[in-house]
Amino acid sequence: MPLGDCLRTDLHWWIDNIASSLNNIKIDKYDIEIFTDASLTGWGACCGTQKTHGYWSDLDKTRHINYLELLAIFYGIKCYAYDLPTGNVLIRCDNTTAISYINRMGSVRFPALCSLAKEIWQWCERNNIWLFASYISSENNSDADKESRRLCDETEWSLSQDAFDKIKFQLDSSRDRPLCD
């Protein structure tokens, strides 16, 4: 049977790593618990009393919500689990598709989701982290949800008149000079 390049890469990974794999199949003790959520506005994550959020790029805004939920998980892990020496991380999320892609380490149905799930697991592998994702209802995930919907309050900036005058003066005085030295 011919194997595609993607499958061949995965099989080589298993061949290289199966002998040294020592993780239990299921571990009920987690070093940290991260709550994540995505909206069309941005992403949010909470861990203990810490909260963080971010906004989507123009490209991300065109992506499906399942992709954004998975990306929110990745950002949450990078924010809160990056400095764990080794660890078991519990992800709490209200999107069952993202949970499935994390717990199954990908899937074959949606290549973009599979690629992102693989990237997440490779990052976790490099950082000695084991993930498990579990469902939390949207109403019980309100902190991460609130972070994901936070509006950018820094959009109404303006240049002070004093700063504008200084810039204008510098431009006016440089008109007689060449632009490049």
Image (cartoon, rainbow, N blue to C red):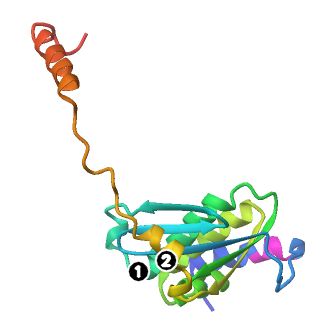
CB atoms of marks 1 and 2 within 8 Å? yes
Q: Label 2, on which residue?
A: 69
Q: Residue 38: within the magenta?
A: no
Nearer to me, 146 or 60:
146
Q: Label 1, on which residue?
A: 65
Q: Residue 170 in the image: x percent, y percent?
A: 18, 14
Q: Residue 27 in the image: x percent, y percent?
A: 83, 82
Query: Is residue 70 at least partly visible in the picture?
Result: no
Nearer to me, 63 or 154:
154
The residue lying at 83 percent from left, 85 percent from top is: 25
User: Pointer 1: residues within 10 angstroms few (<14), some, or many (20+)?
Assistant: some
Kind of residue sitting beneath label 2: Glu
Would you identify the image quadrant in which residue 55 lies?
A: bottom left
The residue lying at 65 percent from left, 67 percent from top is: 47
Which quadrant would the N terminus be assigned to in this image?
Answer: bottom right
Query: Label 1 to label 2, Cα distance in Å?
Result: 6 Å
Kind of residue sitting beneath label 1: Ile
Would you identify the image quadrant in which residue 83 lies?
A: bottom right
The residue lying at 22 percent from left, 34 percent from top is: 159
Q: Is residue 156 above or below residue 43?
A: above
Question: Magenta part of the protein: which range?
Answer: 14-18
Query: Is residue 81 at least partly visible in the picture?
Result: yes
